[in-house]
């Protein structure tokens, strides 16, 4: 059982590994969106002024922070706000070839990146997602849950295409959100004595709290599984690496502690991993 999970995880990682030195461009396109009362004067990267084209800026990958000079309608004094670069997605996916790509990229500025889209808010903050943002998401993922005990011993998995999920996120603060989602699917697996098992269209419900940190999202919350075979409640801890503004790769572990069908404490593990697609629900 554990070997199968490890093999799937390794395959999943290898699919998305790459070498940043080969795939990363030296130039990154940035979008900086000022809110109503903010007017951007110019954007500087070290000693270079970045030319604007309808809110888009071309920047070189470098360790130097971006500095945005702007004015606020309520205060005509020029202000400046900066944003430090972080390690790019391609850098973190350099897990192939025993992470040799990471060692190579330590000597290259191509490992640096900025958020592809940022908002300069009326309250003088530079954020990745602003307060009030609503995003809808659709996951395409592997979901597995298993239990090993004297009373029950089984492993069940659903592959992409055998389950359908959807959900939404609401940013009640800048870069911080609450989310809820559900997943319905068909699960196939086996018991410890190799007996074939199925679980018809299990429902998985998640309510989470999350934070954006550069190109990663970290979340935690509650998880509920209800199906013909399993009824369980527990926690969810997950991480998502957003490859673009729309597409991300997510991994979540859900330890369940309470058996709802038998009203008793019982431990069950759940693992979810796959792609996630996010869409804006407001301008």
Image (cartoon, grey):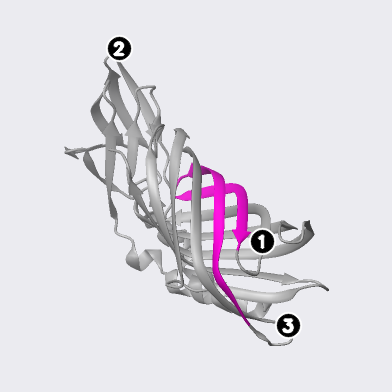
Quadrant of residue 271 within the rendered picture = bottom right
Q: How far apart are marks 2 and 1 (CA)?
A: 56 Å
Q: How crowded is mark 3: few (under 14 residues within 10 Å), some or many (20 or more)?
A: few
Q: Earlier in the sequence, mark 3 or mark 2?
A: 2
Q: Is residue 8 visible?
A: yes
Residue at left offset 28%, top offset 37% = 32
Please say if the residues under marks 1 and 3 sit with CB atoms less than 8 Å apart: no
Q: How crowded is mark 1: few (under 14 residues within 10 Å), some or many (20 or more)?
A: some
Residue marked by disc 2: 74
Residue marked by disc 3: 192
Q: Position of residue 238 (x, y in %)?
A: 57, 54
Pick the residue in front: 119 or 134.
134
- SS class, disc 1: strand
Pick the residue in front: 69 or 130.
130
Drawn side of residue 235 relative to residue 264, left or right: left
- Which residue of the protein is positioned furthest toward the left in this rendering? 53
Q: What stretch is highlighted in magenta?
A: 197-226
Residue marked by disc 1: 231
């Amino acid at each position: 059982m554990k070997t199968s999970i490890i093999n799937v995880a390794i395959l999943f990682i290898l699919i998305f590994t790459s070498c940043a030195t080969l795939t990363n461009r030296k130039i990154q396109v940035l979008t900086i969106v000022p809110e109503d009362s903010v007017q951007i004067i110019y954007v500087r990267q070290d000693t270079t002024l970045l030319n604007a084209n309808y809110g888009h800026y071309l920047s070189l990958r470098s360790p130097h922070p971006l500095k945005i000079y702007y004015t606020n309608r309520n205060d005509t004094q020029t202000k400046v706000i900066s944003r430090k670069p972080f390690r790019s997605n391609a850098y973190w996916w350099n897990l192939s070839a025993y992470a040799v790509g990471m060692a190579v990229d330590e000597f290259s500025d191509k490992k640096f990146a900025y958020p592809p889209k940022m908002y300069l808010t009326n309250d003088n903050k530079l954020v990745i997602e602003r307060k009030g943002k609503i995003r809808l998401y659709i996951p395409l993922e592997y979901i597995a849950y298993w239990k090993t005990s004297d009373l029950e011993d089984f492993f069940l998995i659903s592959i992409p295409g055998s389950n359908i999920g959807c959900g939404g996120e609401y940013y009640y603060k800048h870069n911080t959100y609450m989310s809820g989602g559900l997943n319905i699917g068909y699960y196939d697996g086996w018991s410890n004595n190799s007996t074939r098992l199925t679980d018809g269209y299990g429902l998985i419900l998640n309510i989470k709290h999350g934070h954006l940190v550069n190109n990663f999202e970290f979340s935690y919350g509650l998880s509920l599984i209800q199906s013909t075979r399993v009824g369980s409640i527990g926690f969810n801890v997950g991480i998502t690496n957003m490859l673009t503004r729309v597409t991300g790769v997510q991994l979540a572990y859900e330890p369940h502690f309470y058996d709802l069908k038998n009203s008793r404490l019982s431990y069950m593990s759940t693992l979810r991993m796959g792609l996630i697609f996010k869409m804006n629900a407001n301008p």
